[in-house]
């Protein structure tokens, strides 16, 4: 948008008076933030209604991205950037005596997601608006986001994250668009005079779903899409309602949108989780249908105007919910309704970990959602009947939705969608050949790959302005809208001046991060050290333990040879563990205890430091990533579906240290083997071990003295105050099979780390690698990813420019 500094300053002062009736000089940073947020809203509001108007007038097909999680991060700067007014506002505020960076910190970071899956959804909605795709988010307005993590004596403690405490400047409550979601009750079918079966309900609990809409602003293109998050409320009561029963009901209902489950694996409080899933799915589908009906296009054509994307299995109930509406409310017959539904729905799988595959006990689902359960049974019946005539009975048994008293959500999503995609090439291949092979035999053409991506706006333009400026000076700014243009940087691969500039920027970013750590943790970091970063959820398969065991081996090397020629290292961890995931929490405690041991040992001459940042999330990622030299992507091959921090870190010039897992494989293909450090078992080797059962971790302990010493340190008192955790981890690795082959990959990992130690000493060579990584990161822009979804899955095209 066009905005002069003068106009901005006038607007800002005026808004300050309107909102707080005070002068700027009297305002606190929180108030300064709130006023700026309000102003940004007014700047985008015209485009928001205009975008909607164009969509309606063009009867344009819309995509709805259904996701339990949207890990948005702070939105002020992102909105300013996308409106094209970031610098104007920064300068204007400066003139008014206000520092933009200070007020940016006043915005709570909405942590409405667990990790990669939720952050991907946030990158996607940003990229859809930027790519002019008519696509909107649909999710839950959790009152409490992912827990706030604290370390007490090295242990993770979870505290509530009350992000809405001071209100949310970005949202608009849309009472007129509220819908009713029905839970429980009885349902039976009765034949009507015309012979069709009609459902009858009795005693259902009604929940009012109230939408809160947030503008999703495209990058300098006047497009504003919508993120719709639903809040659960009590419907209006009639006068006879007893006060106490009302309070009871209110508590029950409001708990539905109270808290995001901090667990992406086992669903504690399962019933509430199932309610949450149905709640936002039902509200979303109802609202889509209501909107669609305004266009007066027959329901049979729904799939020409609407695409619904099922982000992991959490929204899989969209399938029976749409069926319910088409059958019961729109009076469509089964075959037509099913045809419409399958054409509307598409599904992304985000993990092959079987622990994470959702299934619901029949009892629970039939009690909570009686009509939905009937429909699921009918889908299952028709599926098994049809497939029995075409496939081996064992295949049908393994693929049906209802099995052993449970409803399998992935099966429901696959059967009810026209597209099933994995999130990296390797992951999609594993789905087709292994995990979902039976379904691949049945529906080969439904399967496709869409490699994940990240938005270069948040992860480069906002997080790393110095690097962004350097790139613009070298190759101009076409890459902002065509990220593959970053490849032009390769022309500077042998330009010493550029490489040194790159090194300087990294150094400055490291200094900035070091300052932050000194301030928040009291730890002094050496910015000349290698900053080695592993930031992701704590899961055994991601192998933070491999990193830790190697750190211990370096420590012992230095203890034995204090003069050993090791380049100083700072190991940076950021990770939350699911509160019920005991093993992951033990690993957190162990890392913290090893950090205490090493950080306080003055005999190793500050050569090793460990920083485990508390409460890792989007805002911290924005600080850590620009300062990283090494990106640790060391999951056991086959286990990490894609990974996205790998992409963010390479985009900021970190060198990837990786197994050939997830999108690491594609990163290697992009930058070439010389510009990435690959180690460890390959996916085929892992499966071979599974097949022949020949992995015996104890023999690695027995035969490898370095490894033995490191492992013994876990149980011989070397690590202070972590006996129980050390013992548990030791046993899991040595005696209980080492499920993720940590000991098997230890030597290869150590050798790769040694290579890094050597490489880093040659600054020009290192920076050349960094440059090639930045140059290759453009293909991993989520702009391209969503464009592929739009053309190959959703079949939506931008026609917004036509009007
Ligand atoms: C993984 C695991 C593993 C251990 C036990 C249980 C469990 C539970 C959940 C998960 C992941 C759940 C889904 C998820 O968040 N997947 C992540 O999606 C990202 C976006 O596609 C992708 O980059 C990550 O590789 C993938 O783990």
Image (cartoon, rainbow, N blue to C red):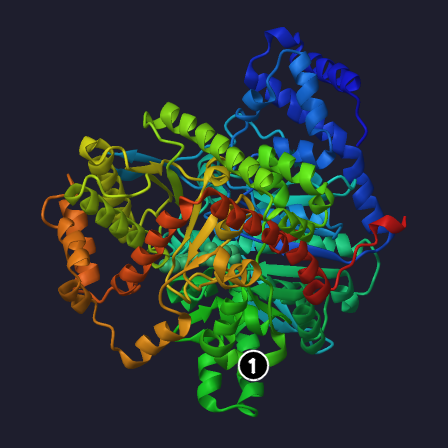
Res. 750 image quadrant:
bottom left
- Residue 203 visible? The answer is no
> Where residue 676 sits: x, y (%)?
47, 56
Residue at label 1?
383
Q: Residue at x 69, y 78 (%)?
A: 335
- Residue 671 visible? The answer is yes
> Where residue 721 sits: x, y (%)?
15, 39
Residue 644 position (above or below residue 229): below
> Where residue 45 sits: x, y (%)?
76, 33
> Where residue 594 sits: x, y (%)?
22, 41
Residue 754 position (above or below residue 201): above
347 or 153: nearer the eye?
153
Give the class, few, some or many, for how many residues have Cα within 10 Å of label 1's Cα (few <14, many ≥20): some
Q: Residue at x 61, y 15 (%)?
A: 98
Position of 520 compared to 595: left or right? right
- Image quarter for ligand 1 equals bottom left
Q: Residue at x 65, y 10 (%)?
A: 24
Position of 35 compared to 155: left or right? right
């Amino acid at each position: 948008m066009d905005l002069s500094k003068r106009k901005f300053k006038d607007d800002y002062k005026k808004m300050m008076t309107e909102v707080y009736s005070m002068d700027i000089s009297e305002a606190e940073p929180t108030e300064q933030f709130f006023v700026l947020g309000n102003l940004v809203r007014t700047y985008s509001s015209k485009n928001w209604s205009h975008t909607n108007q164009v969509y309606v007038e063009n009867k344009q097909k819309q995509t709805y991205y259904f996701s339990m999680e949207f890990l948005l991060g702070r939105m002020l700067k992102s909105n300013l950037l996308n409106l094209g007014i970031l610098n104007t506002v920064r300068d204007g505020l400066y003139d008014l005596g206000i520092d933009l960076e200070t007020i940016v910190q006043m915005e709570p970071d909405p942590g409405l997601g667990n990790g990669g899956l939720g952050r991907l959804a946030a990158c996607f909605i940003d990229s859809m608006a930027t790519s002019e795709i008519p696509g909107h988010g649909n999710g839950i307005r959790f009152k409490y986001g992912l827990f706030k993590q604290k370390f007490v004596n090295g242990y993770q403690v979870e505290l509530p994250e009350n992000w809405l405490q001071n209100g949310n400047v970005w949202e608009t409550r849309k009472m007129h668009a509220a819908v009713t979601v029905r839970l429980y009750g009885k349902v039976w079918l009765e034949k009507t005079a015309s012979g069709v079966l009609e459902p009858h309900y009795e005693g259902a609990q009604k929940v009012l779903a109230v939408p809160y809409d947030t503008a999703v602003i495209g990058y300098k293109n006047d497009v504003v899409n919508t993120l719709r998050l639903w809040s659960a409320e009590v419907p209006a009561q009639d006068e006879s309602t007893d006060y106490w029963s009302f309070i009871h009901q209110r508590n029950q209902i409001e708990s539905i949108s109270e808290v995001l489950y901090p667990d992406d694996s086992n669903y504690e409080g399962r019933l509430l989780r199932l309610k949450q899933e149905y709640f936002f799915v039902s509200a979303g589908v109802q609202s889509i249908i209501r909107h669609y009906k305004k266009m007066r296009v027959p329901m049979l054509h729904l799939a020409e105007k609407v695409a619904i994307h099922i982000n992991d299995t959490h929204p899989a109930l969209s399938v029976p919910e749409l069926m319910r509406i088409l059958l019961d409310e729109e009076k469509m017959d089964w075959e037509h309704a099913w045809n419409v539904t399958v054409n509307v729905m598409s599904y992304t799988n985000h993990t092959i970990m079987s622990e994470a595959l959702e299934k619901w006990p029949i009892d629970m689902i039939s009690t909570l959602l009686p009509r939905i359960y009937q429909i699921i049974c009918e889908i299952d019946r028709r599926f098994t009947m049809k497939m029995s005539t075409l496939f081996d009975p064992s295949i049908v048994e393994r693929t049906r939705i209802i099995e052993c008293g449970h409803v399998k959500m992935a099966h429901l999503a696959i059967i009810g969608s026209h597209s099933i995609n994995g999130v990296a090439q390797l992951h999609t291949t594993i789905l087709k050949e292994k995990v979902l092979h039976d379904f691949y035999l049945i529906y080969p053409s439904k399967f496709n790959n869409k490699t994940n991506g990240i938005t270069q706006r948040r992860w480069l333009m906002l997080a790393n302005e110095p690097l962004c400026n350097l790139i613009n000076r070298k190759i101009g700014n076409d890459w902002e809208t065509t990220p593959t243009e970053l490849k032009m940087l390769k022309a500077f691969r042998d330009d010493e001046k550029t490489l040194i500039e790159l090194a300087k920027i990294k150094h400055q970013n490291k200094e900035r991060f070091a300052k932050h750590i000194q301030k928040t943790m009291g730890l002094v970091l050496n910015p000349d050290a290698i900053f080695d970063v592993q930031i992701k959820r704590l899961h055994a398969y991601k192998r933070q333990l491999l990193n830790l065991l190697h750190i211990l081996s370096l420590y012992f090397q230095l203890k034995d040879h204090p003069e050993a020629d090791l380049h100083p290292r700072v190991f940076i961890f950021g990770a939350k563990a699911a509160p019920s995931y005991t093993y992951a929490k033990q690993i957190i405690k162990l890392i913290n205890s090893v950090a205490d041991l090493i950080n306080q040992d003055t005999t190793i001459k500050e050569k090793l430091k460990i920083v485990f940042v508390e409460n890792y999330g989007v805002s911290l990622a924005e600080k850590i990533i620009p300062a990283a030299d090494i990106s640790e992507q060391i999951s056991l091959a086959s286990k990490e579906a894609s990974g996205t921090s790998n992409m963010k870190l390479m985009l900021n010039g970190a060198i990837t240290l990786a197994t050939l897992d997830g999108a690491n494989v594609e990163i290697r293909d992009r930058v070439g083997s010389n510009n990435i450090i690959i180690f460890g078992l390959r996916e085929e080797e892992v499966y071979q071990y599974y097949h022949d059962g020949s992995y015996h971790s104890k023999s690695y302990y027995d035969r490898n003295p370095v490894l033995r010493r490191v492992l013994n340190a876990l149980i011989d008192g070397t690590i202070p105050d972590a006996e129980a955790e050390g013992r548990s981890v030791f046993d899991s690795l040595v005696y209980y099979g080492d499920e993720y082959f940590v000991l098997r990959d230890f030597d290869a990992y150590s050798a790769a780390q040694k290579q890094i130690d050597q490489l880093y000493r040659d600054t020009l060579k290192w920076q050349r690698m960094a440059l090639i990584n930045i140059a290759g990161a453009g293909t991993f822009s989520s702009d391209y990813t969503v464009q592929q979804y739009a053309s190959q899955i959703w079949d939506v095209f931008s026609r917004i420019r036509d009007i």
